[in-house]
Image (cartoon, rainbow, N blue to C red):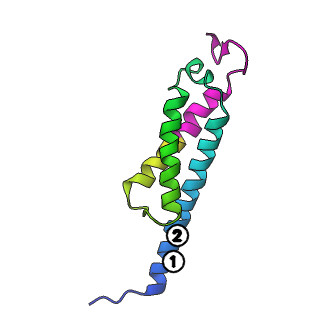
C-alpha cells in the first residue's frame, strides 16, 4: 500500500490550476483582440472569416472559463484544444490581419 502525501497532491493541483488560468488569459486575450479587428481584414489577409473565428475563439473562451474555475481538468482534451486554437490565432492570424490598413483596399500583399 502506497501512502500519498496530501501536500504534494495539493501542490500539483495548484500547478495545474495555474496552467489552466494562464491558458484562460491567453484565450481571453485572443478573443478580445478578435473583437477589435474589422471583418473585412480577414478575407483580405487570406484567412477564415471573422464569424468563423468568433465561433472558434468564443468556444475556446468558454472552455477556458470552465477550466479556470475548476470544472475541467488539464488532463481533459478540451482545455488543450482551446489553448491551441487561441495560440494559432495569436501567432498566425493576428499578425496578418493587423497588417491590413483599416479603411483602405490594401491587403498585406497589395490591393484586393
Q: Is residue 98 magenta?
A: yes
Q: Is residue 80 above or below residue 46?
A: below
Q: Is residue 47 above or below residue 56?
A: above
For the residues bearing labels 2 and 1, Cβ distance under 8 angstroms: yes
Q: Which mark is residue 11?
A: 1
Residue at 42% x, 87% y: name it. Answer: 5
> Could you tell me residue 23's position as x and y percent?
54, 55
> Could you tell me residue 48's position as x and y percent?
50, 26
Decide which of 3, 24 is in the foreground and name it.
Answer: 24
Q: Secondary structure at mark 2?
A: helix
Residue at 64% x, 43% y: name it. Answer: 32
Residue at 48% x, 42% y: name it. Answer: 85
> Could you tell me residue 94's position as x and y percent?
61, 33
Q: Is residue 42 above or below residue 2?
A: above
Q: Quadrant of the C terminus?
A: top right
Q: Residue furthest top?
A: 111
The quadrant in which residue 92 appears is top right
Classify 10 Å Cα crowding around label 2: few (below 14), some (14-19), many (20 and above). Answer: few
Read off the residue under disc 2. 15
The quadrant in which residue 110 appears is top right
Q: Is residue 106 magenta?
A: yes
Q: Residue furthest left?
A: 1
The quadrant in which residue 40 appears is top right
Classify 10 Å Cα crowding around label 1: few (below 14), some (14-19), many (20 and above). Answer: few
Residue at 47% x, 45% y: name it. Answer: 59
Decide which of 3, 67 is in the foreground and name it.
Answer: 67
Q: Which mark is residue 80?
A: none
Q: How many marks?
A: 2
> Could you tell me residue 38's position as x and y percent?
65, 26
Please provide the residue range marked out in magenta.
Answer: 88-112
Cα–Cα span, label 2 and label 1: 6 Å
Amino acid at each position: 500500500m502506497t501512502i500519498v502525501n496530501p501536500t504534494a497532491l495539493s501542490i500539483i493541483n495548484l500547478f495545474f490550476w495555474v496552467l489552466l488560468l494562464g491558458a484562460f488569459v491567453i484565450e481571453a486575450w485572443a478573443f478580445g483582440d478578435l473583437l477589435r479587428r474589422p471583418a473585412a481584414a480577414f478575407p483580405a489577409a487570406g484567412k477564415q472569416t471573422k464569424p468563423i473565428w468568433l465561433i472558434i475563439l468564443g468556444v475556446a473562451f468558454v472552455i477556458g472559463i470552465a477550466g479556470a474555475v475548476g470544472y475541467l481538468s488539464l488532463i481533459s482534451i478540451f482545455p488543450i484544444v482551446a489553448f491551441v486554437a487561441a495560440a494559432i490565432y495569436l501567432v498566425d492570424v493576428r499578425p496578418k490581419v493587423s497588417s491590413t490598413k483599416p479603411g483602405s483596399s490594401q491587403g498585406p500583399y497589395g490591393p484586393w
